[in-house]
Structures are given as structure tokens and as C-alpha cells.
Image: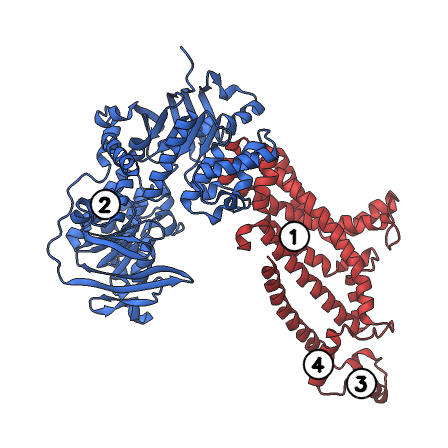
Chain colours: A blue, B red
Amino acid sequence: MADHLLEVRNLSVDFFTAAGVVNAVRGISYHLDRGETLAILGESGSGKSVSSAAIMNLIDMPPGRISSGEILLEGRDLLTMAADERREVNGRRIAMIFQDPLSHLNPVYTVGWQIREAMTTHGMAQAQAEAEALRLLGRVGLPEPENAMGKYPHEFSGGQRQRVMIAMALALRPDLLIADEPTTALDVTVQAEVLGLLKELQRETGMGVLIITHDLGVVAEIADRVVVMEKGVLVESGSVRDVYKNPTHPYTRKLIAAAPGKGDMHRPVEKAEPLLVVRDVRKRFGAFEALKGVSFDLAAGETLAIVGESGSGKSTLARMLLRLDEPDAGTAHWKGRDLFKLSPAELYKLRRELQMVFQDPTQSLNPRMTVYQLISEAWAIHPDILPKAKWRERVAELLVQVGLSADLMGRYPHQFSGGQRQRIAIARALALEPRLIVCDEAVSALDVSVQAQVIRLLDQLRRDMGISFIFIAHDLPVVRDFADYVMVMRKGEVVEMGTVTQVFDTPREAYTRALFAASLDPDPDVQAAHRAARLERAS
Amino acid sequence: MLSFIRKRSLSSLISLIGLVVLVFFLSRLTGDPAALFLPVEASAEMKQQFRELHGLNDPLLVQFGRYVGNVVTGDLGESLRKARPALGVVLEAFTWTLWLAAITMSLVTVCAIVVGSLAAFRSGGFFDRFSSMISLIGASVPDFWLAIVAIVVFSIQLAWLPTSGTGSVLHWILPIGVLFVRPFGIIVQVVRGSMIGALSSAYVKTARAKGVKAGPIIFVHALRNAMLPVVTVLGDQAASLLNGAVIVETIFGFPGVGKLMIDSILQRDFNVVLAAILVTAIAIFLMNVLIDLAYALLDPRIRH
């Protein structure tokens, strides 16, 4: 039998940490052939990126150690190769692209230089590398490739940067491309474009693609086969369709069940008296018009989702409503008073009614404060809410309310997982008994199973306590599960606004339809139909 | 780039003007120059004459106006002791100091970057621990002690090098060697810390995935990113050398601006002291402009 392009056999990787040895990957095996796309699916901490780091020889040893296994590239074990020979494999035979292209491109060199280096480091002459780099930039669809060669990474958008990464990775036509969450940081429409480009380039070159992702939609869109990992162990593998339709392992079933966008949509009752009336909000940053007149109403106990791609102005709007930023024009009446005209003293009193939950709980929770301090700080600032004697009791209540145990209040944020941290951030927002919570991409950084739990929690708070939510997100299925009303924004303007059923079932605007078309469905059959429809439209 | 230089120079100019004002009024705050300069037994007549001669009887603002006018035309007065233009005296000494600082800092920069980078590349290894120890000692050794020990060992015991003065290449070795130690120790630490951060960054991972060799990863990919804090501290250290390495220059009888300043203060040669302050200040301002330029050259994000 011919050798596979790549075969990982019984690979185990350990990391030596202060807390002891962590078995990041335990005895996993998989293989990949030319022209094939294999997805490694898993949540954070599953070890899905570790095996690819081992393939690329990117594991630092120490603290890492490959304790067993082989990684065969066309039958030759990469782990026993001499160092120089091993280095020649990288870039020439196996190349890699990463999740966050901004930090993975060197900020102080031009992209032309960086793409050239991928070739010159393996012995290609400067002039030839220059010509080839130019051709590659054109091939991956960067506008004005000649101009782009002399620019630095920070001068491009996220999607363009990922195209630069792809051009760099494919410079020497590698046999294998490893893509570690290549589209996670990108907008949906950009994600669809980048995945499309990868597929196209794969057809052209016949390379094998190993894609590492947490997103079932990405798997459905691009992969032929999938392996599912949980806590360092490979729990299931098979064709994408088989695994999705007939998952055998309970973890796979749980993962598929947690995928958002399948439940019933909310059917909001007739509009009650609006709590927040926003009219014609405008803001510019220098020459850039971030908001070009945005208006909406929000009633108590309602959820308004604001969806849009980066640069649409959705976060700017949220920051203005909380007066973290000042608008240039417009009004926002909260219970009849204009938020934008409040004095600092009035604003201070009102703050407690308006709270925000941010995207990244690791950054928004002070690492040197315990959970008890983090949550009770609100009462130190607003002493009229709760006498100090009752703080401990109330913190315990709040922790239970967000699904954590009360005896965790003495711990620090780093002792929790990402999902637990976001619950702490929500508990902190709830401490002030707010009437409105603005969630800015509050579940985007969380694993799907955790995401589902947090959404359920927010929805319950909305029902039980009548809290209103402004829910900013780029992930449409999540919005579908949680929102009453949806506002679609683009370049500072409202494109479309309506109830969740109207916007999702019968979108009126072409842009909204384009957003939905680009959004990936976890079902490979549905996704195949989307793809076919897209191709039809294109031709 | 040009507009960046222009803007930066302009803001330096403002600080420079502030400095001229400060220097003038500080010199008048220390007391009556005539009383300070002339011997204690000088008669009132002599003092009066001295004041007439140097225009010290005019209102302070008039004196200040004259001083500014002179500074702008490059006239910083006569050295009261040497009967030569103070500026000439200072520039002569400053040239010596400039050479001393330039040679020392060039050596420090190259050596510290190489040692710090290699220490960072295998952090925790033998070389790292060894260089950490050396740099820690270097950063903490007092220079007057080191200078004296160096003279005892190399000039007196071994008789390889002259004890002091100028005249040959050999005369430079001990002052440079002694001045080298502290900035080297400090900058090795800065390079090491900054390089450890850069080497663990995502773009270094990308370079490794591209198959780039260890050498270019350290000295091309990581180093340029790690240089910003290093340049800051380099500037700091260079400034303290430009100020005149007072102690080292005095011990080695090196005719630099530090020694000149001490001598002039002791001799109450105010015009020379004022000129020396002004010249070193201008040099330090110029160096800060250069440092900002280095930032912009190193990091395109600062340029834009």
C-alpha cells in the first residue's frame, strides 16, 4: 500500500507545567492524502492545535515533550529527521497559516519582503522570488499587488492579511497546508471568500489540507473527513457527512446539539412602551464617518441584536449609549431623559441601570481581584444598593444565578475557564440590578457548548428579571436563537431592521441576504446546497 | 519621514529655548558673579570695575536679552581664566568626550546585542545564566573603584597601559574599558528581556513554519522588533556619557567636557560652565532626535 501524504501514528505530547505534567495529546492517529481536506474539530483545551504544532516542529521542548509516536510524511518520520533536513521540510513541503494574521506577520517588514523570504530561505534567487511574490499576491486576490508588496501588515484589513499569509504559505507549492483556525477572526463574508480561495488553490495544486477548527460550519464547508478531539483524545473520525448525521461518541453528539441556530425563534409581542429611544446618532473619527444617523427603539425585556461586519459601527454605537464615547449628534432617551445630555453626576446615578459585558472576559476582569472583590466592587461605588454586611450573601446568590458555585468567590479570574469567566462578568453586570445590558460580542470567544449555556442564561435573565439586551454579534445563528429584533448595520448605516423571524426568514435587503449566504451551516448537506446556490449566482 | 523630522526638531527647539532661559537665570541665582569670581579681599572698586566690564550693572532683563543675542550668534563670552572664547574651550573638550562616548557606545551596542540575543535564544541555559551574572556585576560595579583597580592591574602591575593622559591609542583603552562596563551590563539585561518576548511571538512561529534558519530568526525577525526598548535605554546611557564621564575623565586625566566642567566650577569660570551646559544640552537634544528617528526607522507603525 502506498504511503499516505501524512500519517500521524499514536502521537502523545506532554507539557511540563508548574502544576505538573499535562498530557496535551494522548495516542492520537490520523492520516491525510493528497487533494484531501481533513478537519480536526475540537473546543479549547482539546489539544487540536498540538498535533499540528508537532507536525511543524513548533513545540518548544522543554516545556513540551513528544513522549511517543511517529509523524510520517510520505513514509518518512519527521520526528527522527536531522535538524537541517527537518527545517527544509517547513515551508517547502508543509506550510502553515494561523488564526490571527496580524500577530503572525512580522510588523516591521513589508509583506513583499516576508513572502520573498519564504522562497529565498529555501535557496531561490532574489529576483525570481520577487517576481513570484508579485504573482502570488495577485493570485490570492489582493488589489494592486505591486503596491501591496511595499506595504506593512498593519496597512491591510484582516481578510487581506490572511490572503497574504496564504500567499506566503503557498509560495513553494507545498504538498500539505495546515490551517489553524484560519477564518475565526474574520467577518462571515470574508470567511466565505477565504475558504473559497483555499479550496480553489487546493484544486490547482493538489495539496492536502489539514484544517483545525472549532466551527462545525467550517468543517461542513471545506472538509472531506473530520476527526473530533476532546481533552487530548481522538474520540471520533469519519467522513464529514457520516459524523454529522450519525455521531457515535457522546461528545460529538453534544457538540452538534450545541451548534446554534436550530431552535425556535422568538416571537416578540406587540411593542410595549419603549425604554430607550435612539434617534439619528452620528459620529465621525476624523474623515471616517463611523455612524451616519442610527435610530431604534427598545422596550423592557426585549433583545435587540445588532449584526454587521467589522467597521459597520456596531461597537461604536454601543460605546456611545454607555457614554464611553461621545456622539457628534443625535439623542438617546432613556426613560424620557437624553443620555447624551446628562451631566457626569446624573450619569453616575444612571450608570447602574446600564451595564456592559465585553467580548474578552480575560481582559475585562482585573486579574488581581478575587471574584468576590470583582462583583462587590459595584456596591462600593454605589453604596446605596446594598449594606456591606450583605455583600457576601449577595455575591453567593449572583454566582448561583449565573450557574457557578458560591464557594468559588475567593478565587481569581485565571482559575476559571473562558466560559466561567464570562459568567463572572455577567454576575458583575447583574450586581447593579441593571435594566439594560449591552453585550458586545459577549459569546464570540466562547466554545459552542459554553456559548449555548451563556445564551440560555441571558435569555433566562431577560424573562425572569425583564432586563433588556442590546446584543452585538457577528455570528448569525447565535443571534437567531436569542434576539427579538434584529438590526443589520453596514458602514455606519442601518440596512434593515425587523423582528428576528422577518429578518431571518424573509430578508428584504440584498446585503442581509449576502450575510446569510456567507454564514456557514453545520449541516454538510445544507452547506453543499448553499455552495451550489452561490456558484449558480456567480455564473 | 521629512515631516516627522521637522516636527520632532521643532519640539526639541522649544525645550532648548527653555533651557537657555533656565541656564541664564540659574547662573544669576547663585549670587553676585563679581563677588564669586574675584578674590575675597578684592576692593569694592575692583568689583565695580568687574561689573562694568561684564555689563553686570544693567537690569537683569537687558542682560538676558544680551545673553540670548550672544547665544544666537554663537558668542558665549570669554573664558575668565584662559582668556579665550568659552565656546572654543568647551568644543575642544567636547570633541574628546564625543569620541569617547561614540566609541564606547558602539562597542556596548554591538556586544550587548549579541550577548543578550544569544542569552535569550537559549534562556535558562548555561550561557544565559553566565551572561546574566556578568551583566549584573557589570551594572553594579562602581566606576571609580573599577578605574582604580584597572590602573593598579594594567598600568602598575602589568605595565601594559599608560595610567592617564592622552597621546596614543593605548591611552584610550582604559577609559573606554571602564566606561563600557556599566552600560553593557544594563543593556544586556534589556536586550535579553526584550528578545525573550520577541522570540516567543507569533511572527517568530510563522518564520519557523517557513523554515527560516535560527540566525535570521534571531537577528532579522526578532531583533528588530525587540530593539525599541533597547534604543531607549541606549539613548539614556549615551546621554550620561555625553554629560561627561566626570569621575572616569578625572581619574584618567582625560581632557573631556566632564573634567572641564568640574575644573571650571572650582575655578568659578562661569562662562565656560554655562557654555558647557549649553553644548552638552544641545548634544543630548540632538541625540534624542536621533533616537526618535531610530524608532521610526525600526518600526513602520510609528512612521505612519
Left or right: B224, with A392 as reference point? right
The residue carrying mark 4 is B64
Q: State the residue at coordinates (81%, 71%).
A: B86
Answer yes or no: are tags 2 and 4 on the same subunit: no
Residue flagged by tag 1: what amino acid is it? Answer: Leu
* As drawn, B84 above or below A78: below
Residue A230 in the image: state x and y as whole percent. Answer: 32, 29
**Whether label 1 touches label 2, CB < 8 Å:** no
Disc 1 or 4, which lies upstream in sequence?
Answer: 4
Residue B234 left/right relative to A45:
right
Q: Is residue A509 left or right of residue B92?
A: left
Q: Do callouts 3 and 2 mark residues in contact (Cβ within 8 Å)?
A: no
- Disc 2: host chain: A
Is label 1 on the same chain as label 2? no
Determine contact: label 4, label 3, CB under 8 Å.
no
Q: Nearer the viewer, residue A493 or B223?
A: A493
Q: Which residue is mark 1?
A: B234
Q: Amino acid at mark 2?
A: Ile
Per the image, the residue denoted by label 2 is A455
